[in-house]
Amino acid sequence: MKKHIVTLPGDGIGPEIMKSAEALLKAVGEKFNHEFTAVTKDIGGVAIDKYNDPLPKETIEACESADAILLGAVGGPKWADSKARPEQGLLKIRKHFNLFANLRPVTIFDSLEASSPLKQNIVHGSDLMIVRELTGGLYFGQPSERRDGGRSVVDTLTYTHDEIERIVRTAFDTAMTRRKHLTSVDKANVLESSRMWREIVNTVSKEYPEVTVEHELVDAAAMKLITNPAYFDVIVTENLFGDILSDEASVITGSLGVLPSASLSETGLGLFEPIHGSAPDIAGENKANPIGMMLSVGMMLKYSFNLHEESAAIEKAVNQVLSEGFKTADLKIDGAATLSTTEMTEKIISCL
Ligand code: IPM
Ligand code: MN
């Protein structure tokens, strides 16, 4: 198979972990006989520095002719006061390519159970997928502005019926490939948008009789994620709730550093990135955990290129390295040796 990828390393530790992704792609290509080509473009803070634009035209054009996009991370204190913000690059690329379906799997590796801030008997057996709507809601609604000379402010939460229906369908389809249990999270006791969301979930559910569906209010869901994470299989929710719940769910695993994500469009173009940020405090120190990025490569192979065996091989290699007693600085595994970013990358590749 021949595929062309755009890599967007971005800021902070982004360039270091993207090197891990590139090395992994090369190794998978050699082992499984695929030809992956890649071109690197700018996004976020580095793009502001170079082009005064967090998502330059050149980057968009390169992505338009790509089969998939890999992204490292954006943002950092350097751009805290700049007019253009690095995060705008990320929001714009999501919107431009209609990447409405954000899949965030939260998997607990056995060897990491003890790293979790929760008790081991509570995290044990947790394996959930957050399906977050990514191109609507409060993040994109207009108007969004200060008014009355700065004395008041408005943000707008809008969704069309079709926007809700397509993400709900993605969630049902995802549930069908898993344990067939879908939790739709909303705030229907307060918000009209949530009441419409609920109606659509109930309508679509008739087409998926095998899937058990329930509705949970977002505050209760936040609590249950901590008290009983193993209860969940697939969670579907709107943009802002999904942002908050996915960070909450990620710490259950012991480190934000190990989690990948996929952002998919209807046409099949996908963007794949670890869910952690740019970690400017450790940038350039060869300390960053490359696992979230490498598993994002795995999600790309699976969701964009349909290479299931290759994707499973990456997951298996990561599992093996962790259970053989190797870790990065962010992980707590008793007696395990701490590796640098490049050492961990090589170790995982050697287990493929
Ligand atoms: C995420 C991030 C982004 C978001 C930020 C960087 C704009 O937190 O991908 O979850 O809020 O969506
Ligand atoms: Mn977030």
Image (cartoon, rainbow, N blue to C red):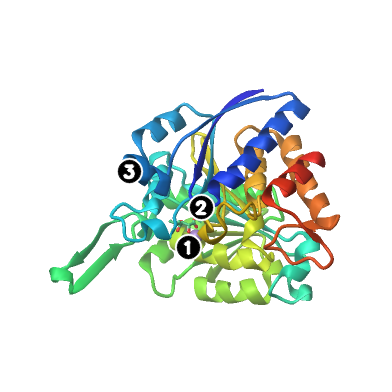
Q: Is residue 50 left or right of residue 266?
A: left
Residue pointed to by mark 3: 53
Q: Is mark 3 within 8 Å of ligand 1?
A: no
Residue pointed to by mark 1: 198
Could you say whether the residue bearing mark 2 is in a helix, strand or loop? loop
What is the C-alpha distance between the residues marked 1 and 2? 39 Å
Counting from the top left corner in percent of width and height, residue 40 is at 50, 33
Counting from the top left corner in percent of width and height, residue 170 is at 55, 47
Residue name at image x 66 percent, y 63 percent: 255
Q: Is residue 148 left or right of residue 197?
A: left
Residue name at image x 74 percent, y 23 percent: 33
Residue pointed to by mark 2: 12
Question: Pointer 2: residues within 10 angstroms few (<14), some, or many (20+)?
Answer: many
Mark 2 or mark 3: whose residue is earlier in sequence: 2
What is the C-alpha distance between the residues marked 2 and 3? 17 Å
Q: Amino acid at mark 1?
A: Arg
Q: How many labels sit on residues?
A: 3
Counting from the top left corner in percent of width and height, residue 300 is at 62, 39
Q: Is residue 131 left or right of residue 232?
A: left
Are circles 2 and 3 on residues that touch, CB within 8 Å?
Answer: no
Which is closer to the viewer, label 1 or label 2?
Answer: 2
Q: Is mark 1 within 8 Å of ligand 1?
A: no
Which is closer to the viewer, label 2 or label 3?
Answer: 2
What is the C-alpha distance between the residues marked 3 and 1? 38 Å
Which is closer to the viewer, label 3 or label 1?
Answer: 3
Q: Amino acid at mark 2?
A: Gly
Which residue is at the front of the view, 315 or 134? 315
Mark 3 or mark 1: whose residue is earlier in sequence: 3
Q: Quadrant of the N terminus?
A: top right
Could you say whether the residue bearing mark 3 is in a helix, strand or loop? loop
Are circles 1 and 2 on residues that touch, CB within 8 Å?
Answer: no
